[in-house]
Image (tube, rainbow, N blue to C red):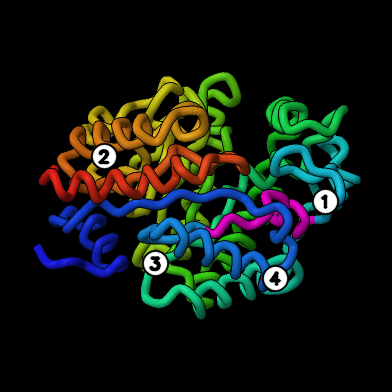
Amino acid sequence: MSELSKRERVDATLKGEAVDRVPVSAWRHFIDEERDPESLARISLKHFTDFDWDWLKINPRATYYAEAWGNRYDFDHYDSVLPELIDGPLNTPADLDKIQPVNPTAGVFAEQLDLTQRVKAGIGDAHFLQTVFSPLSVLAFLLARPKTHTIQASVQAQYDGLRDYIRENPQGVHDALQVISSTLAQYASATIDAGASGLFFAIVKLAREGVLTEAEFAEFGKPYDLQVLKAVEAAPFNMLHICGPYAYFNDVTDYPVQAINWATLGQHNPDLVEASRLTPKTLVGGVDEVGTLQVGTPEQVIAEALTAIRATHGRRLLLTPGCGTNLDVPSANLHALREAATIAQTEGL
């Protein structure tokens, strides 16, 4: 087979067609650049070029959705990818009526649309996705009130707060989610108009055992997810990211997306073979970003990647980590991830 362009390679994969080699990508946050669209676009495109990825996932700062509804952060104090929370509109379940519609193309959303346009101008014909958190994920950020500024405390405060708000004011939660999903749907549509190929739609560690029950996710998560995704269902490349261990994978296989990304290794989720029996969608993953990619050798990364390619016979697979990589992920391991696709091509896998 003749060599395909990056876009052709991804498009063929999404259709289940043969490709010259498996498409590869990985993504991470860039803390120092993430508040300036020009700087973030530049470093994102450099990452894309330096590692020869086949498509780009934009990693905006994790809090921009919550900022849209009034959360304020101290950007001089980060723990991992989260700046320190100063304050926000939600302090009790009775405050949920403070969540009102906001302009989907103004404020932080305008900033992200600017970023999208800059990436579009610099990436050529390759696909790229803008990250949008699910409505429930946005609400979790808004209501979390961690006692200490650590990422662990922040995440736990999201879980605890969400369960408390659902228990104490379920109708208020529904009303807030309707406002958030309506705004995000309009913003998502504007993102496609700005040049993105689609969304990287992220359910941030909420659709899983130990956080919400399947019934709670079915009531407070899925309907609002579908409202956002419906607004961009004509886009050529939408990806669902279902984050974390023990994920409710079966509950999202019918989402209107072309591809699903999740942690396929070491987190009690379906592996690639099992997932291929559960959905005909393109599978996105194959390498453990917490273990092998972070602390393994390049040779181990290549071995793990080749195992993923063999498991899928190189069809309907976008080879990636199961989530964003750490800020200090070894560059040699990222190069090895990309090299694995070339090795597989050479070996006829």
Tell me whether circle 2 and circle 4 mark residues in contact (CB < 8 Å).
Answer: no
List the single residue furthest toward the bottom.
121
Q: Gap between marks 3 and 1, in whole Å?
A: 31 Å
Q: From the image, tell me which residue sits under label 3.
A: 127
Q: From the image, tell me which residue sits under label 4.
A: 111
Q: Gap between marks 1 and 2, in whole Å?
A: 37 Å
Tell me whether circle 3 and circle 4 mark residues in contact (CB < 8 Å).
Answer: no
Q: Earlier in the sequence, mark 1 or mark 4?
A: 1
**What crowding class fits label 2: few (fewer than 14 Cα within 10 Å), some (14-19), or many (20 or more)?**
some
- In the displayed structure, 60 sits above or below 279; it is below
Q: Residue at x 9, y 62 (%)?
A: 1
Residue type of the residue flagged with mark 2: Thr
Q: From the image, tell me which residue sits under label 1.
A: 71
Q: Secondary structure at mark 4?
A: helix
* Number of disc labels: 4
Residue type of the residue flagged with mark 1: Asn
Front in this rendered view, residue 267 or 41: 41
Q: Secondary structure at mark 3?
A: loop
Q: Earlier in the sequence, mark 3 or mark 2?
A: 3
Q: Secondary structure at mark 1?
A: loop
Q: From the image, tell me which residue sits under label 2.
A: 279
Q: Earlier in the sequence, mark 2 or mark 4?
A: 4
Residue type of the residue flagged with mark 4: Glu
- Residue 59 part of the magenta segment: yes
Residue type of the residue flagged with mark 3: His
Can residue 297 be seen from the camera position used here? Answer: yes
Which contiguous range is marked in magenta? 58-69
**What crowding class fits label 1: few (fewer than 14 Cα within 10 Å), some (14-19), or many (20 or more)?**
some
Image coords of residue 255 (percent x, y):
38, 47
Can residue 278 be seen from the camera position used here? Answer: no
Quadrant of the image occupied by residue 262: top left
Front in this rendered view, residue 53 or 97: 53
